Amino acid sequence: MDDFQVPVYSSSEVIEKLQMKWQSVGAGMRKKSYAAMYSSFFGGITIDPAMMTIPIDDHMVHRGHGVFDTATIFDGNLYDLDSHLDRLLNSARLAKITPPFPRHVLKTILVKLASVSRCREGSLRYWLSAGPGNFSLSSAGCSESTFYAIAMQEDHEPRRSEVMQGVKVITSTVPMKSSIFATIKNVNYLPNVLSVLEAEQNGAFASIWIDDQGCVAEGPNANIAFITKTNHLLLPSFKKTLGGCTANRLIHLASKLVRTGVLEGVTTKDITVKEGKECNEMMFVGSGLLIIPIIAWDDHPIGDGHVGDRTMILYDLLWDDMKNGPGRQRIPVSYN
Ligand SMILES: Cc1ncc(COP(=O)(O)O)c(C=O)c1O
């Protein structure tokens, strides 16, 4: 017999072990970054990372029956929270999850969580799940749907110089999700994970999905945009990809650049790989990263192989919107 010891702990011993684990494994970093968690399962907020747990029979854990979203905390404000909440609720509807609370309560919880977390720079990530109850496929036996949210401390220091380096991408060989699963922001990110690992193994930043018609789809956690030779901002339509809140905001803001002549126009349409590779500039667009310029795709340089001016103008546009955008874009968090 193997002499591996499997202890059986009391509840208080488990709590003690979890807290010790967080002190050692977290090495300060993780502990600090996970500032607060809300769980509808215990009906409140904890700031102890060791208690930031969810039930193992929650269908989000063992069946992937959950949806999620994120929102950025920037300079003590929640940026574009309403768009992210709308998308969360739409994802929940399509995934047949009835939230445990109405929209305004979910929003109140998220603002309160940001406040308790004391994070002035960071992000919120939140999940709606079919909930715990059993290990079946059907959610019929789930006692209640659940809402979980975590506030994370992160640095949003201007990273313009870092962004200006640009990144390389490859075409993913990992099959992309079919449109019904790609358009719901659900917790099944295995294809996204595998495509990132593939990119990393090939010395690239990320992989890009091409759809079954040979058109550009999206990256593993970001949408894609181009600047054409005729100076148009071009994005793949969102029929087969996640409708990005950042991409939608960018499309809205970029109309200013059309008025001032910086861009000729803004278009969403199907974009073939050839068309994409012939563009002057290419970029990832997403809420975690804002904009990341892409300078090479499958070793093919995009434009002159350097970060384009228009890409950086769009980056600055989004950055300014996070910092100084209109009130409805930025919900102030009270830290008193
Ligand atoms: C697959 C995928 N596409 C696109 C995006 C960009 O969406 P957003 O701008 O709302 O972050 C994300 C990020 O959430 C994503 O995971």
Image (tube, rainbow, N blue to C red):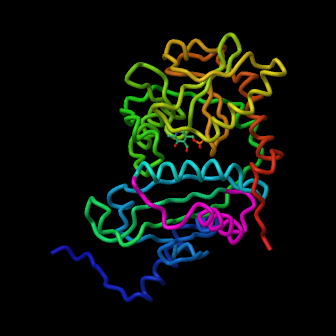
Q: Is residue 101 magenta?
A: yes
Q: Quadrant of the N terminus?
A: bottom left
Q: Residue furthest left?
A: 1
Q: Which residue is drawn at the image coordinates 27% and 59% (left, top)?
A: 137
Q: Is residue 186 magenta?
A: no
Left or right relative to 9: residue 265: right
Q: Which residue is drawn at the image coordinates 37% and 35% (left, top)?
A: 178
Instruction: Give the total number of marks visible in the rendering.
Output: 0
Q: Quadrant of residue 319?
A: top right
Q: Which residue is drawn at the image coordinates 81% and 40% (left, top)?
A: 320
Q: Which residues are magenta?
A: 96-122
Q: Quadrant of residue 244?
A: top right
Whole-percent x and y of residue 116?
A: 69, 72
Left or right relative to 151: residue 274: left
Asked whether 130 or 319 is in front, the reply is 130
- 268 w.r.t. 241: above or below: above
Quarter, ligand 1: top right
Whole-percent x and y of residue 3?
A: 22, 77
